[in-house]
Image (tube, helix red, strand yellow):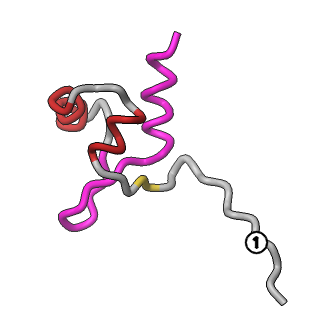
Amino acid sequence: MMQNATPPIPSDDDLLAIGSAELKRILPLSRSTLYSRLKTGELPIVRLGKRVFLRRGDVLAYVAARVK
């Protein structure tokens, strides 16, 4: 018998594995602005090998700081 498993509650430390197109839907920035924010550290990244990730909490904090 299978039980209904509740999905885990996301943590702010969870890494987002999404592409730039998906990220642009969350953050309505142009591609060049998005990459500029990543390069300057305004949106901190986590590198695992050649892959680049963002922490969920960092994205939420970035959005919250800009919402009025």
Q: Where 68 sits versus 26, above or below?
A: above
Question: In the figure, residue 25 lies in which quadrant?
Answer: top left
Q: Position of residue 60 (x, y in %)?
A: 50, 34
Residue under the image location 44 percent in, 38 percent down: 58
Q: Quadrant of the N terminus?
A: bottom right
Front-lying residue, 35 or 1: 1
Q: Where 3 sits versus 63, above or below?
A: below
User: Tag 1's secondary structure?
Assistant: loop
Binning the other alpha carbons within 10 Å of mark 1 as few (below 14), some (14 to 19) or many (20 upward) gives few
17 to the left or right of 7:
left
Residue 1 included in the magenta stretch of the image: no
40 to the left or right of 66:
left
Q: Position of residue 18 (x, y in %)?
A: 36, 53
Front-lying residue, 46 or 18: 18
Residue under numbered circle 1: 5
Q: Position of residue 42 (x, y in %)?
A: 30, 30
Question: In the figure, residue 41 lies in which quadrant?
Answer: top left
User: Which span is picked out in magenta?
Assistant: 45-68
Q: Exactly how many numbered labels are in the figure?
A: 1
Outermost residue on the bottom side: it is 1
What's under tag 1, amino acid-wise? Ala
Residue under the image location 23 percent in, 37 percent down: 38
Residue under the image location 19 percent in, 33 percent down: 31
Residue under the image location 80 percent in, 73 percent down: 4
Q: Where 49 sits versus 3, above or below?
A: above
